[in-house]
Image: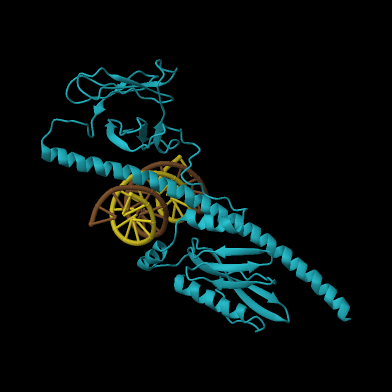
Chain colours: A cyan, B yellow, C brown
Amino acid sequence: MDSSVSSQLDSSLNDSLTDGEENQSETSPSPAAAAQVHTCAVSLAEESSGVTVVQLPGQTVQIQGVIQAPQTSVIQSPQVQTVQIATVAELEDDESVTDTQKRRELLSRRPSYRKILNELSSDSPAVPKIEEEKMEDEVPVSNSPTVPTSIYQTSSGQYIAITQGRAIQLSSPGVPGLQGVQNLPVTSSPTPQPGAAVLQCAAQPGDSPQQLFIQGGQVLIQAATGDIPAYQLRSPNSGLAQSIVMAASPGSMQSPSSQHAEEITRKREVRLMKNREAARECRRKKKEYVKCLENRVAVLENQNKTLIEELKALKDIYCHKAE
DNA sequence: CGCGATTCTCGTCACCGTAT
DNA sequence: ATACGGTGACGAGAATCGCG
């Protein structure tokens, strides 16, 4: 299914619904689509952005054009009129899109999950908003922004980024729980906390090593003397120092060309690291979004059921009166 | 238990929209 | 114009499932 099909369904839907008194619209539902009997006052309008506004009694539902597979639900009042409503549903496994290019074009036009969800939530307070960059599991760092200024790599593949705010970011690609970068708070405590690691560094040769304590961290980075700042990683438990790999270091004494190459490499590493994080975050939001959609489906199905029952009761009353 | 199929997860790339 | 973030697509590897 692609957008053309779904928009076609949408427009036929609009026709059938805005015509109001008209009888059945003949949009043929896909065989797989489950027909749902549904009777209620519904009005639909498709906005230019692909947002379909569904007016339910006492509720307005905005359905954004996500990956849409037209799942027709038939509003059907036996003997009176048959109206078909195409509702949207997430396109799942049965998607038969072979033209990836088309799909890509379609998908790339979608706004972000956060946007979609927030739009939804503005309509119905039941839908939780995706919070703006507020990671509850993230340890608060200092007030200053955490723009990485130096990135170092350990022999085990772990990345350490020391940011301008003197926060330390640990990126451990293989750790599932921490999922990559950890932001470690840097305290000014003169004594290390039990289990805390110590970061020592000498920004300039000859400087006395700076000690930074990392709460809950597992590393000790210690500056060495000499022109090139050297760092050691130590686990507080084992006390074993990992070998040192300097992916890039401030003030290294290399030729300009190799410096440039290193700069490029460093930039690439930073970009990849950020992108990795972004992908992680994106997936998290996507999951949240899908969960919300599923909740909405449940709610709407419930509503549907209630309305059907209500209609049935009203019909009964009407029939009795007519007799 | 072994093996193939399916699903899940993650990293990377490419692209787009937005901010500066 | 450029940098940057968000996100879909894609591929690889891990995990899980189902079957003989």
Q: Quadrant of the C terminus of chain A?
A: bottom right
Query: Residue B14, relative to residue A44: is it above or below?
Result: above
Give the side of residue A6 with respect to residue A60, left or right. Answer: left
Task: Give the mark count.
Answer: 0
Question: Quarter of the image holding residue A300?
Answer: bottom right
State whether residue A169 is above or below residue A199.
Answer: below
Q: Residue at x 42, y 45 (%)?
A: A280
Q: Nearer the viewer, residue A162 or A307?
A: A162
Within the image, what quadrant is residue A45 found in? Answer: bottom right
Q: Position of residue A89 (x, y in %)?
A: 54, 64
Q: Position of residue A151 (x, y in %)?
A: 28, 34
Residue at left 52%, top 55%? A117
Residue A201 in sight: yes
Identify which residue is drawn at 35% across, 30% down: A166
Residue A194 image offset from top left, x and y in percent: 45, 17
In the rendered view, would you say A224 is above or below A40?
A: above
Q: Position of residue A236 (x, y in %)?
A: 38, 20
Front residue of A231/C10: it is A231
- Residue A160 appears anywhere in the view: no
> Which residue occupies the extreme bottom position in the image?
A22
Q: Residue furthest top?
A: A191
* Most foreground residue, A188 or A99: A188
Q: In the figure, is residue A178 to the left or right of A200?
A: right
